[in-house]
Amino acid sequence: MAKSQRAHRLVPRRRRALFTAVGLLTVAGSVTVPLVAQATGGTDPADTARQRAFAAAAGEFHVPREVLLALAYQESAWDNHAGWQSAEGGYGPMHLTDVTATTVADGGADAAGPADVAKLAAPPALHTLRVAAKLTGLSLEMLRTNDAANIRGGAALLASYQEKLHSRASAEPADWYGAVARYSQASREQGARAFANRVFATVKNGASRTTPDGQRVSLAATPEIAPATDQLAELDLPMEKTAATECPDTVDCTFVPADPSTGQTSDRPANHIRIDTIVIHDTELSYKSAITTFQQPGTSASHYVMRSSDGAVSQMVRTKDIAFHTGNYSSNLHSIGIEHEGYAAHGANWYTEAQYEATADLVKYLAHRFQVPLDRQHIIGHDNVPGPSSTLISAMHWDPGPSWDWDHFMALLGKGGKERRGVGGAGSVVTIAPGFAYNEQTLQICPSDDPTGAVTACTDVNQPSDFVYLRTLPSKTAPLFGDWALHSGAKGTDRISDWGSTAQAGQQFVVAGTQGAWTAIWFSGSKVWFYNPHGVNTTRANGVTAVSSGATSDSKPVAVYGSGYPDASEYTTAGLKSSPQVPLSMYSIPAGQAYVATAAPAATDDYFASSGKAFIGGRTMYTIQYNHRTALVYSTDVSAEQLGGGRH
């Protein structure tokens, strides 16, 4: 989540809100449907049960199978969430909602009293699970916890919307556009259109996935689909008039201004403050509570907040302005922040396909506008941002955490997934690429990691993850590497919040050696090892620049920084108050080690909101992939070499 800049306040974490005041649509009237027992297929493979459940429900309620599959993919990526309720009050693959006054109150809805809470929880759009129960005759508990029942309930609900709109079913998927838009429960035409368009884009392009609980579900592409988009008018939804937003047309986007104290007015990049990074966050709050928090003085804010259920966006800070979102003012100067409703300790359950796809569209739009490269060196997580000073590194946030599927997200950006796995010898560069769905790691989650309150004692979980563990020796029994800022030289842990012992998908490092199935890299000033048989967890990287302190044993260690401000003497000459530029005391690049530069060296700089002017220093710095986080080094302190090229 966002952090304020110079004061570095930590935003208080609240219990999750299971409520968002979405539309006030009246749910379609009762439809008589048969109660057909869910086929299990007897001898059919257990890992295709959910695929068969979609087929059975589609046949029972005369819903085109591809529409039902595509709708559920947008709602949940076909996950069942193990019976949990999402941040939007939804259950199961079909995201059937059941919001109560209790969940509204627990979620911090900022209501004035019990009557207000009850009123907030009352709209029919927040109780689609109960409507599905009436349509199917199934119990509320079955619809919450049983996959097949939940899918039947969603199919019945969608069929009821189709009957209400057209008084008939249809075998043509294109004829279900209006019903799908209605299923979104959006209160504005923009939201309903964005949701329906994403569902039918999934029908057109197809999808395939193995869910976290091992279910294999797929949908073949139907490239010739031409949905009846004119049906949207039949819903008679209002077009909300809002302030202009900076979003692509494919995203449902409104402008909700953050409190002015959560950022600074600027004129990036026209005033020579470059925008070169987009930072992915999660909120650790509900969508509504995050927006409310960002509207409070003295807190922090990101430029955008993305809702879990449907990928709707609230822009809260103009991109030209500086938002206090990373906990590092130097990083804030050059970045745009996107918050995602979700919880890092349970990210795979709440990072929905709707979020991934809407965020990908938003990132591509922003990257095109500001010429930000679409790679993991410029599209980063909050957990990759460097600490601005030695004392603040350990307090840096670790969201979006190990459950953000970087492979899938980068594929949506049109990047990644095409390189062959492998690893070169010492001095070459690798990109960490463990996959996600099949990269299951053991993590310990403790109550302090989970603001939802669901975790009441430290618990080990096995889950798909975006990282590889780093060890001090090439052995599975060797201690995990302990980052100096977190452990002062002690061994690392498998705690979900312990970012120091992990290398993340898309990050690039210089190979320090290999031994059997193990690969060593230079990392945080040390030589660390990760399991990499036949290069299965890496791809070879070419055309990158590596920086080092020098090849000789008497080369001096290079100082590492968390910010890129001009020298103090330069401020004095200009008559300005300097920002502190001090090396990170526990970090350096020792002699003989090398690290990958994420971009060409950039000028040191600072910004003064009182005058609206940037102050550009006389020196340049490389941003490097130093450990799980990036860091900065002066270009004059290092030797730089491009793979395949000469020293410069």
Image: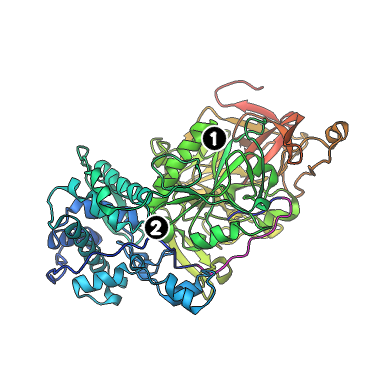
Residue 483 falls left or right of residue 359: right
User: What is the residue that sits farthest to the bottom in this orientation?
Assistant: 114
- Horizontal side of 517 relative to 11 (left or right) equals left
x%, y% of residue 15?
Answer: 53, 70
Q: Is 213 left, or right, of 384 in this rendering?
A: left
Q: Which residue is mark 1?
A: 429
Residue at 65 percent of width and 32 percent of height:
547
Where residue 443 sits in the image (x, y, percent)? 50, 63
Sequence-wise first label, 1 or 2 = 2
- Whether residue 585 appears in magenta in the rendering, the answer is no
Residue 389 versus residue 477 in the image, above or below: above
Disc number for residue 241: none
Figure quadrant of the C terminus: top right
Question: Within 10 Å of the Cα at label 2, are there few (<14), some (14-19), or many (20+) other Cα atoms?
Answer: many
Q: Which residue is mark 2?
A: 309
Q: Which one is in front, 281 or 361? A: 361
User: Which range of residues does the magenta coloring cover?
Assistant: 6-16
Q: Is residue 423 visible?
A: no
Q: CA distance from mark 1 to mark 2?
A: 39 Å
Q: Position of residue 255 (x, y in %)?
A: 51, 48
Query: Residue flagged by tag 1: what amino acid is it?
Result: Val
- Determine the secondary structure under disc 2: loop
Image quadrant of residue 638? top right
Residue 148 in sight here: yes
| Residue 13 included in the magenta stretch of the image | yes
Whole-percent x, y for residue 453 in the image: 52, 73
Q: Is residue 313 left or right of residue 484?
A: left
